[in-house]
Image (spheres, helix red, strand yellow):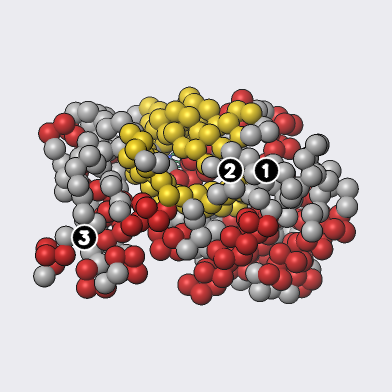
Amino acid sequence: MTTSSPAPGCPAPSCPAPGVRIRDLTVVYKTPVGELPAVSGVDLTLTPGTITGVVGESGSGKSTLALSLLNAVQPPGRIKSGTVEIDGLGDVVKLGGEQLRQTRGRKVGYVFQAAQNSLNPLKTIGKQLLDLGRSHEVDDLRALVRDAKDLLARMGMDGARVLDSHQHELSGGMRQRVGIMLALVLNAQVVVLDEPTTALDMITQATILRIIREVHEERALTTLVITHDVGAVAEVADDLAVMYGGRVVEHGRITEVLGAPRHPYTQGLIRAIPRLSGDISLARALPGRPPTLGTLPAAGCVFRERCDKRMEICETVEPQSVTLDGRTVACHAAGRPLPLVKRKEYA
Ligand SMILES: Nc1ncnc2c1ncn2[C@@H]1O[C@H](COP(=O)(O)OP(=O)(O)O)[C@@H](O)[C@H]1O
Ligand SMILES: [Mg+2]
């Protein structure tokens, strides 16, 4: 069920999933007090064929990271340094103009945050789909429409009716599913989904994530799913990256990260979710609030203000990321045993 002509020498969906390597990525926004980093020295590798979940509270830099994968950070922001290497594309930070336009949608499919608000109000969804196909020189537009209907049907919608509709005729949840369809329909092999299910109720959310997983497997994709809902992503992701204050503070296999989190922030996030911590009476909100660009400490660990494992060194020295047994953690205290829930504390 491929729609568009395959990449030269690599007939989708049989080509291997591409790897993505983000290295030392720093993205800044211009503010009244100068440029401040929303993403700071991030290293993150997306293993080919996997789904990586990215979690973290609001403002931790998740959307800025997602935009960087498409070199789509807009002013007042800019990628200050670093590289984003995608197999078959090279360093997308260096791409510009037509090359970049061709990449977006066709090579890297994406649903931006609040995608349900980014459709054109004046055109039917079907017209927008055809525009998308033409702008990427898709030869077989009938096949494109067929695939779009198929994807919409899998997500529980009447495809023909949706394609005939304007966005105002669709609910928020339906528009969000249209956004997901548009991200997948050009057969991009790297797919970035930023909060793809926030407008959906819990049941629909689970269904949509399951469909994303199915399509991901059928088409050999490399997928990044951003969410503030750790519980939701736990069902679909292979790997998990935890962001705080513009840093990836922990990264590894999702079962291992959730089963035995090593960073105190990850531990706090998990404790706050009853269905992950296993007992509603043990659920405990993470105290304090995440930093904003203006309140990020200039030195030391960005999480220290809220950290129950804080040590003297955390005040002055930023912890480096250390990888051990496939788990990357940036914490001075992470070498020490950090049990997920000290049950006695709650007795
Ligand atoms: N256009 C912008 N101008 C200034 N600051 C921004 C802009 N977009 C995001 N930021 C700031 O960058 C930080 C990271 O934002 P974002 O990447 O949207 O985080 P998340 O997606 O995790 O909520 C936040 O402190 C946010 O306020
Ligand atoms: Mg966001």
Q: Which disc is residue 16 wearing?
A: 1
Q: Give the distance between the C-alpha atoms of the residues marked 3 and 2, in whole angstroms.
A: 33 Å
Quadrant in the rendering for residue 8: top right
Residue drawn at x 37%, y 52% is 256
Q: Which disc is residue 314 wearing?
A: none
Of badges 3 and 1, the one in the foreground is: 1
Quadrant in the rendering for residue 331: top left
Contact between marks 1 and 2 (CB within 8 A): the answer is: yes
- Spot the residue most to the front: 325
Q: Give the distance between the C-alpha atoms of the residues marked 3 and 1, in whole angstroms.
A: 40 Å
Residue drawn at x 54%, y 42% is 47
| Relative horizontal placement of residue 1, taking residue 33 as reference (left or right) | right
The secondary element bearing badge 2 is classed as loop
Q: Position of residue 18 (x, y in %)?
A: 63, 40
Q: Which of marks 1 and 2 is nearer the N terminus?
A: 1
Q: Position of residue 223 (x, y in %)?
A: 57, 49
Which residue is under mark 3?
341
Graded by Cα atoms within 10 Å as few (under 14), some (14 to 19) or many (20 or more), the crowding at tag 2 reads some
Determine if residue 50 is in view.
Answer: yes
Contact between marks 3 and 1 (CB within 8 A): the answer is: no
Q: In which quarter of the image is ligand 1?
A: top left
Determine if residue 28 is in view.
Answer: no
Which residue is under mark 2?
48
| Relative horizontal placement of residue 238, taking residue 153 as reference (left or right) | left
Quadrant in the rendering for residue 153: bottom right
| Relative horizontal placement of residue 83, taking residue 165 as reference (left or right) | left
Which quadrant would the C terminus be assigned to in this image? bottom left
Q: Earlier in the sequence, mark 3 or mark 2?
A: 2
| Relative horizontal placement of residue 269, taking residue 98 as reference (left or right) | left
Q: Give the distance between the C-alpha atoms of the residues marked 1 and 2, in whole angstroms.
A: 8 Å
